[in-house]
Image: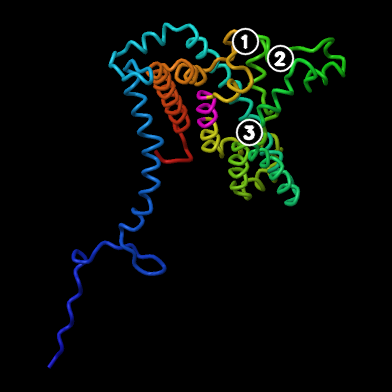
Amino acid sequence: MTQKSKPMPSAKTEPSRWKLSSGFVPIYVPILFLIPALLLLLSFRYIPAVSAIFHSFTYWNIPEPSEFIGLQNYRALFDDPIFIKSLGNILKYMVGRTALVLVMAFVGAELVYNLTSDRWRNIWRMVFTIPMVIPITVNLLVWQQVYAGRQGMLNEFLTGIGAMARPYPWLGRPDTALPALIFIGFPAVAGFGFLIILAALQNLSSEVNDAALIDGCSRLRRVFAIDLPAIRGPLALILILSLNQGMQEFAPMLVMTQGGPINTTMSPAYYLYIQGFTYGKHGYASAIGAVLMLMTLMLSMFILRMRYRKAYDVEV
């Protein structure tokens, strides 16, 4: 008498599980671990953004209740000469700062990448990484002393070598205040961009570099013919992050210039802070934030579109 084989359990009747090295885990367990992060993201990112967009259409001066007024905040915003001037200031700052950071980070990463000694490569990587742990406020206060009109380090150096006859108020003159903010941290090698570019360069195939050297390609030509095209993705990421940070820049204006002199260093983010926390015009400040968010989004989409246009290194 033959023994009937026991029927295999149907996949539909078993609860959904993920197979891990230690056994089977129900599919809802990873979701439970993601819930706290999702709640924090909703509480401090998405809900404030939606609230700002809503209140940008209201007259809201805390502690008064908000009142819906439609597009009046936006009409007043684009008739505000200070806000229009702040847009021009931040565009100049954003372009200048991004170009400085991107170029100097790439140069620093290329120099470290081309070192033949692993020991010295690690030392210079550490040297360019340590400044990232210094608080931004400390860095700004140091550079405020560098630009100081009396006994400032820059003035003392320039007068010492005979380049200037008298001290110059770098942060107190309209023609030099914004360029001075752009050059904070010069040469701007140390930073997140340097680490991204260096990691991208180290991931390049050594066989391609060896073949280029055998064919007689110089190191300078290899930079433009091989390195730059191969790291287009990381460069696009740094460009987006730098432009977004420049568009929303706030700390240098607050700590060093307070938007002066004559609003030549006023930024939209600092103007938002003044309207919201100094004058209590939270509806007007929300309109500034909504415009900044829209400009940042459009800028990021434009850069991504240009990066992936006719791209050969990714599939889109």
Kind of residue at badge 3:
Phe
Stretch in magenta: 240-248
- Quarter of the picture containing the C terminus is top left
Which picture quadrant has residue 79? top left
Kind of residue at badge 1:
Pro
Point out which mark residue 224 bears: 3
**Earlier sequence position, callout 1 versus callout 2:** 2
Residue 257 sits above or below residue 50 on the image: above
Crowd rating for badge 1 (residues with CA inside 10 Å; few <14, some 14–19, many 20+): some
Spatial CA span between label 3 and label 1: 41 Å
Kind of residue at badge 2:
Trp
Residue 214 sits above or below residue 101 on the image: below
241 within the magenta span? yes
In percent of the image, x 65 and y 47: which residue is there?
A: 211
Give how far across and how far down residue 43 sits, in percent.
37, 38
Q: Nearer the viewer, residue 265 or 215?
A: 265
Point out which mark residue 261 bears: 1
Give how far across and how far down residue 70 sits, in percent.
29, 14
Q: Nearer the viewer, residue 226 or 68?
A: 68
Mark 3 against mark 1, which lies toward the viewer? 1
Give how far across and how far down residue 41 sits, in percent.
39, 40
Residue 312 sits above or below residue 60 on the image: below
User: What element does badge 1 sit on?
Assistant: loop
Name the residue tied to disc 2. Answer: 170
